[in-house]
Image: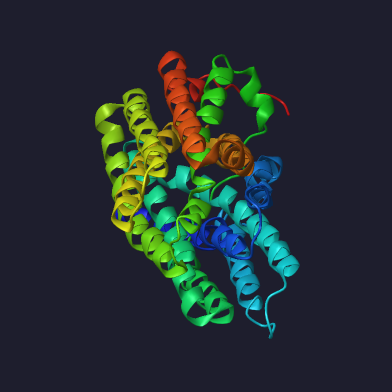
Amino acid sequence: MRTATKLGLLSSLYLSQGLPFGFFTQALPVLLRHQGLSLPSIGLAHLLALPWALKFLWAPPMDRHGSARWGRRRGYILPLQCLSSGLLLALALPEGGLDMRLLMAAVLGINLLAATQDVATDGLAVDLLAPAERGWGNGIQVAAYRVGMILGGGVMLAVFDAVGWRPTFLALGTLLLLATVPIALFREPPTAPPPAQSLGLRWWLKRPGAAAWLTLLVVYKAGEALATGMLRTFLVDEGLSLTAIGWLLGGVGFTAGLVGALLGGGLVVRLGRRRALLVFGGIQAGAVLLYALAARGPTSLPLLTLVCGVEYVASGMATAAVFTAMMDACRPDHAATDYTVQASLVVLATGAAAALSGFSAQALGYAGHFTLAALLCAAGTLYAALTFHPPRSLASEAAPEVS
């Protein structure tokens, strides 16, 4: 299978995950702020993404059992993605307004479906990509996911502002359905079930050096998540309209996130995993600090556009670096489980940081909140400098064990 074909398929899958997640993480906080909800309440709404942190619990049986007819990974991805699209389209059916409790239940349901699909998608990515392709593969992964988030977040926010909630959910569900076509046409090569080995955290906790690596995953992106958890409400409180926020996140975010992810994915191979984590982590800390500087003085749309653009580039680069290192740490036979354990820790850390962001912003003000977030980014980068060893050494030490 050609590299371009692999990257095209993975792009459609990660775009599919980003579409609904972008709406619920980028557009929804803005809409809730317009409804008058407090910052702590908006921050706690991030807990609806809990399935992304808990997906490691059901990853092992998904790794062991798959459909011989539909494909080991594809047999999960295709129906789950169709269900997600159907749920989004169903949100457009009620007339006379959308009940907030119904919306929150849908958020939780779609997060559960998308997180489960992500287990199979990550496993498919590790299966398809050769080690030399992983830098670009993870750059494409992050870029496509961010494009999906921008389309589902910033662009859909502008659509919501212009035509209301029903066309918005119709458009979102239809886009997700169209993104399902590549995986529907894909024919996954048959693979044998993996041998019985220790799965999940049991295997990780027995590996020398694993504790330091898993701790790095917890701290590396938490500071940025703390900052961006209040970015949308900051833009609302600065007086930007829904359309302006949609353009800022959609136009600028689309371009900057794409550039950052592709640039980071390409440079990971040249710089090496360790140097890429340090360089991109330092740039990320500096970019978050720009939010604090913007919050301290008079703001304007051009200034906020510049600051958001820089931060999106930096975040894309740092994410591509850490995802590539995560992929290196996976055992080939248990790629979905091993990658999911690592990804769940990242999501747990970033989700907790986002959930607490409202309390931090309310206590410290936006300027103090973003300063604290920048310091946490710097601390995560410093920890990487002190502890990082190539994760591949963890995977190479794996030996068959009876479950």
Residue that appears at 38% across and 30% down: 281
State whether residue 180 appears in this view: yes
From what the image shows, is residue 235 above or below residue 215?
Answer: below
Residue that appears at 31% across and 26% down: 272
Front in this rendered view, residue 66 or 51: 51
Expressed as whole percent of the image width and height from the top left, the position of residue 369 reads 52, 37
From what the image shows, is residue 179 above or below residue 346?
Answer: below
Would residue 221 be found to the left or right of residue 336 on screen?
Answer: left
Q: Residue furthest bottom?
A: 95
Expressed as whole percent of the image width and height from the top left, the position of residue 70 reads 58, 62
Residue that appears at 47% across and 22% down: 379
Q: Quadrant of residue 200?
A: top right
Q: What number of labels is visible?
A: 0
Would residue 311 be found to the left or right of residue 148 on screen?
Answer: left
Q: Quadrant of residue 155?
A: bottom left
Expressed as whole percent of the image width and height from the top left, the position of residue 303 reads 30, 51
Front in this rendered view, residue 243 or 385: 243
Front in this rendered view, residue 244 or 95: 244
Expressed as whole percent of the image width and height from the top left, the position of residue 58 reads 70, 45
From what the image shows, is residue 345 above or below residue 38?
Answer: above
Q: How is the image coloured?
A: rainbow
Q: Residue furthest front?
A: 298
